[in-house]
Image (tube, rainbow, N blue to C red):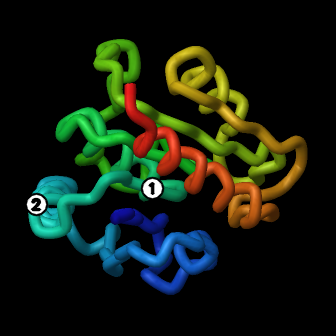
Amino acid sequence: MILFFHGLDSDNQTTKFTAISHPHKYCETVDYRRRSYEEISRHYDELIARHNPALLVGHSLGGYWALLKSQQHGLPCVLINPQLYPAFRADYPALELASCDDGVLRFAYLELGDEVLDIQRIFRALDGWVTELHCLGGGHHRVADLGRMDALVRKALERLNKPG
C-alpha cells in the first residue's frame, strides 16, 4: 500500500496521486496552512499506524513529510520535486539529511525545470544520499512527465518485493 502526501495548497485529487497506477494507494487532504507542524506530524503518524504502508510518496511539501516520516518510521519513500526547505511557516524545522544512513530505500524524482523550488540546491542535497536520484532536464514543479514519475514508484515497489 502506498501512502501519498500532497503538496502545499493541493489535495487528494492532485495529478501526482491520481497518476500512480498502483491500485492500493491512499491520500488524505491536509491543510498545511491552518494546521501546525506538530498537528500534521501527529496526523501523519496516525495515518501510518492505520494504513501500514509499504511505501511513502510525497510531492513538494508532501516530499518533506514523506522524507521526515521515512526517517522516523524506517519506511521506504519516493520524493517528487520535494520541498526540503519550507519557509511558509516558522514552525517547520530543517530536515537532517546527513544523519540518515539507515539502509532504507529512498528514491527521488526531480524535474530540473522546477520554477518554484531551488531545485539545484535540492539536487545537491539529495545527490549521493538517496538510493536512486532520477532527473528530467526541463519539466516543471507540477510534474510534466507523470508517466516517468509513476515508473519510479513502480520500480521502488519492485525493489521492495525482491528478496535480499
Graded by Cα atoms within 10 Å as few (under 14), some (14 to 19) or many (20 or more), the crowding at tag 1 reads many
At 57% across and 80% down in the image, what residue appears? Answer: 18
Return the x and y of residue 77 as percentages of the image width and height.
Answer: 42, 44
**Secondary structure beneath label 2:** helix
At 53% across and 73% down in the image, what residue appears? Answer: 17
At 68% across and 56% down in the image, what residue appears? Answer: 151
- Label number found at residue 73: none
Say above or below: 94 vs 114.
above
At 34% across and 32% down in the image, what residue appears? Answer: 94
- To which quarter of the image does residue 34 belong? bottom left
Return the x and y of residue 24 as percentages of the image width and height.
Answer: 39, 74
Q: Which three-letter amino acid code belongs to the residue tagged 2?
A: Ala
Q: Quadrant of the N terminus?
A: bottom left
**Secondary structure beneath label 1:** strand
Say above or below: 4 vs 72.
below
Say above or below: 145 vs 125.
below
Graded by Cα atoms within 10 Å as few (under 14), some (14 to 19) or many (20 or more), the crowding at tag 2 reads few
- To which quarter of the image does residue 48 belong? bottom left
Q: Who comes first in sequence, dot 1 or dot 2?
A: 2
Instruction: Indicate left or right for 149 with 113 as reference.
Output: left
Q: In which quarter of the image is the C terminus?
A: top left
Q: How many marks?
A: 2
Return the x and y of residue 119 as percentages of the image width and height.
Answer: 69, 38
Considering depth in this image, is 51 or 41 the residue closer to the camera? 51
Instruction: Indicate left or right for 95 with 11 as reference.
Output: left
Judging by the rendered image, the residue that carries numbered circle 2 is 49
Which residue extends farthest bottom?
13
Instruction: Indicate left or right for 31 with 118 as reference.
Output: left
Return the x and y of residue 23 as percentages of the image width and height.
Answer: 47, 77
Q: Which three-letter amino acid code belongs to the residue tagged 1?
A: Val
Judging by the rendered image, the residue that carries numbered circle 1 is 57
